[in-house]
Image: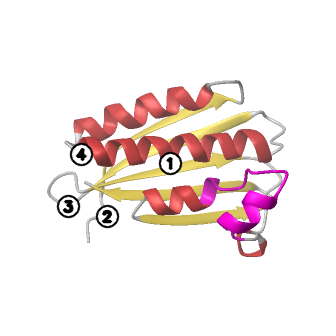
Amino acid sequence: MAEGVLREVTLALPMAPEMELEASKTATAIAESIRMSPDRIDEVRMAVVEACINALEHSQAPDREVFVTFQVLGDRGPEKLRILVHDNGVGFSPEGREEPTMASKLKAVRKRGWGLKIIQGLMDEVEIRSGAEGTTVVMSKMR
């Protein structure tokens, strides 16, 4: 399996309206540079936007920043794009959260809560590390 880091770019983004668009632009540029297909680029872009919005809305990070690291992985050439979205917020228990369902959300006043499920559907691998030091969403997509 390809795991050598060929290239790495990290953005420190202020938690401000539309900051997720900067992360999306960078995700697009890097995915295009490794010749990822347009459909896969769209999936990566949507997952990055969801992860950034989650950090913005839920982290309560005192520094009001989101750190987005893009890593191109491979042995002989680019094979995978790994993206880490990190905040220094309050953290949460990924295991303790309720899975959203269409039936429950249709009846609910609050229709939100789909972000992590969407990210998991869009990416090939997703890992959530969360605790008192903040939350990191690690997501990967094969080229």
Residue tagged by mark 4?
Answer: 36
| Residue nearest the observer in this picture, 10 or 96 | 96
Q: Write down the region rendered in magenta.
A: 99-116
Q: Residue at x 19, y 42 (%)?
A: 35
Say whether residue 22 is left or right of residue 79: right
The image's colouring method is secondary structure
Q: Nearer the viewer, mark 4 or mark 3?
A: 4
Identity, as a three-letter code, of the amino acid under mark 2: Glu
Q: Answer with mark 4 or mark 1, whichever residue precedes in sequence.
A: 4
Question: Residue 139's spot in the image, x, y percent?
Answer: 48, 58
Q: Which mark is residue 3?
A: 2
Identity, as a three-letter code, of the amino acid under mark 4: Met
Q: Nearer the viewer, mark 3 or mark 1?
A: 1
Magenta segment includes 113: yes
Above or below residue 78? Residue 1 is below
Say whether residue 107 is left or right of residue 20: right
Q: Residue at x 74, y 54 (%)?
A: 134
Q: CA distance from mark 2 to mark 4?
A: 17 Å
Q: Nearer the viewer, mark 2 or mark 4?
A: 4
Kindly state the secondary structure of the residue where label 1 is placed.
helix
